[in-house]
Image (cartoon, rainbow, N blue to C red):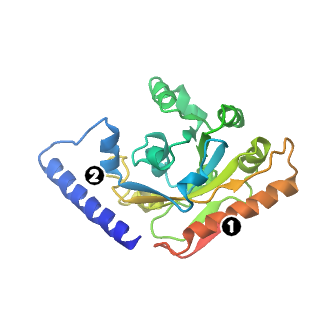
Amino acid sequence: MASELEALRRRVAQLEEENATLKSRGAVDVSASIDALQRVFPAAPRASARPDFFDDRSVYLFGYHPHGIISVGCFTQFAFDGSGASKLFPKLRFHCATLGFNFRIPFFRELLLGLGIIEVSAKSIKNALSSGPGAAVVIVPGGAAESLDASPAAARVLTLRKRNGFFRIALQHGAKLVPVFSFGENDLYGVRGSNSATFGSPMPMRRPIITVVGDPIACPRIPEPTQEQIDDLKVQYIGGRLRLRQGRPGPAVLTIDK
């Protein structure tokens, strides 16, 4: 893991040097290709479980943490497939979920639909999970509340305790619940705008993102789960999420709050 991080840091340093050269020449490095996206945000997905644990006989609900400012790692890896998630999980069909407002923007809506992105509503998530085995919906349960706690090199605060719909849908569909944590997501923007952009633009800074995908948690299919059953699943999920943090670089404190 340490060697991978060091390699990513060297690559980031090289990219920053290249970008500084382009800026001095008055040029902008723009590319519409997926490969270019990986060059801008070096990202690497890792599965803590064996990839064959993710078969095409089940449906999956991935919970991505932390939210960060705009969940760059989530969409870079699972929607744009900028770092080979489709090769790591070849049997899954990923659908990232985003705010419904984004589908009201002309042309941007078509881009989202073309990438298989859906609205983060109970109806859309349930429809995607009902599309058949192999469906994998990726949502960021912390939402806007968790984004307010995004800060580089600070204690990680995840918004989970009051989230029930995420776990209710997993039980209603008998989905396998998968905790995901991205190391580096909170480092893409500075604190309160300080160093928060690339050369003064709203683009995130170039920082490596390592996304660790945890073991899938099998959920029984329960059409009308009780609050007690939801809470029991939440405890299992938080335990799986905490295990992803063990032995990883960065702040040692992880708080599950709100």
Q: CA distance from mark 1 to mark 2?
A: 39 Å
Q: Nearer the viewer, residue 173 or 226?
A: 173
Amino acid found under the numbered disc labelled 1? Gly
**Disc 1: which residue:** 239
| Image coords of residue 41 (percent x, y) | 35, 52
| Image coords of residue 242 (percent x, y) | 62, 68
Which numbered disc, 1 or 2, marks the residue that appears first in the sequence? 2
Please tell me whether residue 251 is drawn above or below residue 34 in the rendered image. below
| Image coords of residue 13 (percent x, y) | 25, 62
**Disc 2: which residue:** 199
Residue 163 shows in this picture: yes
**Residue at the image position 55 percent from the left and 58 percent from the top:** 50
Q: Nearer the viewer, residue 216 or 248?
A: 216
Q: Nearer the viewer, residue 9 or 155?
A: 9
Counting labels gives 2
**Residue at the image position 79 percent from the left and 42 percent from the top:** 172
Please tell me whether residue 205 is drawn above or below residue 170 in the rendered image. below
Amino acid found under the numbered disc labelled 2? Phe
